[in-house]
Image: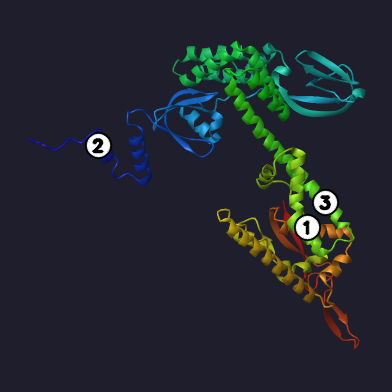
């Protein structure tokens, strides 16, 4: 009689995963632990970085989903804005929602800015008069005398603001062609939904089912439900569409106010999920737009402030360097935060995360010697790897994971290192000039324009705010990079004397940055 125990299902499963890789073993064990009843468990990452485990029991493309938790058995309702964008994409893709997101149908238009301050927009069409501009709008074609137009701008508008619904449907249908199968109807349905032609969208979603009932069943079923809600709740749908129009016009403040008003007026709306999605998109686009504006305003303020400093006859070199290293960036950030009504942290984040942009170049000119011999001729690229970044001379950043007392010590060391560098550079600069000209003497005799250029170069390298791309040398304008000048002494013998312009360095230092 065989008395050995028959292995249970869990033991068999554990045996089956032997020999798998470490990651696979963990995944398999996790599935066993989280699925005691046999239903499929899923790990969902939330926006705050935490994770929840369980089974997704209901799913809505526009709002979110509900999950039966594996640890407590409770039901958790999650909106899409609770999750990071990559997680939203992953979960939707796992259920067939890939690449069919409705997009707004925008039309290229012109904006006529009139002298009375109003703006008229529409599609430019040929005018019957040489003295007027004609615009096609939903209400018809209107003409505006040229003498009343101050300027003309280009832009984009929602299709329904330019065409009547039946006209817009004909335009979209002509672009997509006559649908021949389920995919053709789906593409046309998605385009119509994005354009706000909900009745037409529903007709083509239904045509998808009629053409092939098995084609993207979850997607089409979900879209038909959503379109039904939009049509039934017409007043709410129109308000959400108007919010989108504000978004496309870059009227972000008004759009956000309208979202809040929508929630207050319709607290039980079946389209609250759409309102939340709109709010996220508005804030993202607003942040992007602010980012572009902040970069432009930063450089504008920087040049304005440095230009003002360069004209101050009482400004010493030492005070100028301290301002450029420690005060100027912070002052600009504070002013921008006030102008944009953003927090200092948000402005700093937008500035730090900037990318691309124009490359600027400034030269230290005859003041290259102020940096000291070593730094003055330290040329090369600074944007290629971490080792080159260390050449910039701006001390290491404090370790964010250190204790507060450690951070204080790091700051003290950085300040001491900066003071030592200043002293070394000053001594080196004095030794570099045969006449013993001090940096302050040189500074006092400098004209405002050369001061401005020197300060811009110095801020780029030592203000800890710029992305320095390259430092390179330009031949000294006096000695042509020889480092000396040839002359004749009192005995009429040829002699060489150190170039008084470059102080023997041979080059002027140029800095390229963005």
Residue at which label 2 appears: 12
Nearest the viewer among 449 and 47 is: 47
* Position of 293 relative to 162 (above/below): below
Image x and y of residue 307, in percent: 85, 53
* Among numbered discs 3 and 1, the one appearing first in the sequence: 3
Residue at left offset 34%, top offset 36%: 33
Image x and y of residue 236, in percent: 64, 16
Image x and y of residue 385, in percent: 60, 57
**Residue 305 disc label:** 3
Residue 330 in view here? yes
> Left of 416 or right of it: where is 83?
left
**Residue 323 disc label:** 1
Residue at left offset 56%, top offset 30%: 81
Name the element at disc 1: helix
**Quadrant hosting residue 453:** bottom right
- Measure the C-alpha gap from mark 3 to mark 1: 11 Å
Asked if the residues shown at circle 2 and circle 1 are in contact, with their CB atoms under 8 angstroms apart, the answer is no
* Among numbered discs 2 and 3, the one appearing first in the sequence: 2
* Position of 250 relative to 353 (above/below): above
Residue at left offset 35%, top offset 46%: 21
So how many labels did they put on this image?
3
* Among numbered discs 2 and 1, the one appearing first in the sequence: 2
Which quadrant of the rendered structure holds the N terminus?
A: top left
Query: Which residue occupies the extreme left position in the image?
Result: 1
**Quadrant hosting residue 293:** top right
Q: Residues within 10 Å of mark 3 (few under 14, many from 20)?
A: some
């Amino acid at each position: 009689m065989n008395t050995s125990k028959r292995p249970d299902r869990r033991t068999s499963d554990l045996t089956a995963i032997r020999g798998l890789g470490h990651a696979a073993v963990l995944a398999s064990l996790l599935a066993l632990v989280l699925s005691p009843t046999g239903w499929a468990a899923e790990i969902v990452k939330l926006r705050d970085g935490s994770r929840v485990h369980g089974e997704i029991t209901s799913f809505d493309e526009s709002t979110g989903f509900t999950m039966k938790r594996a640890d407590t058995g409770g039901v958790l309702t999650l909106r899409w804005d609770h999750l990071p964008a990559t997680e939203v994409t992953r979960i939707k893709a796992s259920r067939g929602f890939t690449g069919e997101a409705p997009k707004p149908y925008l039309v290229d238009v012109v904006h006529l800015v009139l002298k009375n301050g109003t703006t008229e927009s529409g599609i430019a069409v040929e005018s019957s008069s040489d003295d007027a501009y004609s615009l096609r709008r939903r209400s018809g074609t209107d003409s505006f005398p040229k003498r009343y137009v101050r300027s003309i701008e280009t832009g984009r508008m929602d299709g329904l603001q330019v065409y009547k619904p039946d006209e817009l449907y004909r335009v979209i249908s002509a672009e997509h062609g006559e649908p021949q199968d389920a995919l053709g109807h789906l593409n046309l349905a998605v385009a119509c939904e994005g354009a706000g032609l909900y009745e037409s969208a529903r007709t083509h979603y239904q045509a998808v089912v009629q053409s092939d009932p098995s084609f993207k069943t979850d997607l089409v079923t979900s879209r038909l439900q959503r379109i039904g809600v939009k049509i039934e709740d017409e007043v709410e749908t129109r308000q959400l569409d108007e919010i989108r129009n504000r978004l496309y016009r870059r009227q972000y403040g008004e759009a956000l106010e309208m979202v809040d008003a929508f929630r207050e007026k319709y607290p039980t709306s079946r389209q609250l999920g759409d309102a939340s999605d709109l709010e996220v998109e508005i804030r993202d686009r607003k942040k992007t737009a602010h980012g572009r504006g902040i970069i432009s305003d930063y450089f504008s303020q920087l040049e304005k402030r440095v230009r003002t400093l360069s004209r101050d006859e009482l400004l010493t070199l030492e005070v100028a360097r301290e301002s450029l290293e420690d005060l100027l960036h912070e002052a600009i950030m504070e002013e921008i935060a006030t102008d944009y009504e953003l927090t200092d942290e948000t402005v700093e984040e937008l500035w730090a995360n900037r990318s691309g942009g124009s490359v600027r170049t400034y030269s230290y000119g005859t003041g290259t010697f102020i940096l000291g011999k070593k730094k003055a001729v330290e040329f090369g690229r600074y944007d290629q790897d971490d080792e080159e970044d260390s050449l910039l001379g701006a001390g290491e950043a404090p370790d964010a994971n250190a204790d507060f007392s450690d951070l204080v010590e790091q700051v003290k060391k950085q300040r001491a290192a900066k003071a030592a560098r200043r002293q070394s550079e000053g001594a080196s600069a004095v030794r570099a000039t045969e006449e013993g000209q001090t940096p302050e003497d040189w500074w006092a005799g400098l004209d405002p324009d050369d001061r401005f250029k020197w300060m811009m170069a110095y801020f780029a390298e030592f203000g800890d705010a710029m992305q320095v791309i390259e430092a390179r040398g330009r031949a000294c304008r006096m000695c042509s990079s020889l480092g000396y000048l040839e002359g004749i002494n009192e005995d009429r013998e040829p002699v060489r004397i150190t170039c008084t312009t470059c102080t023997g360095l041979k080059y002027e230092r140029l800095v390229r940055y963005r």
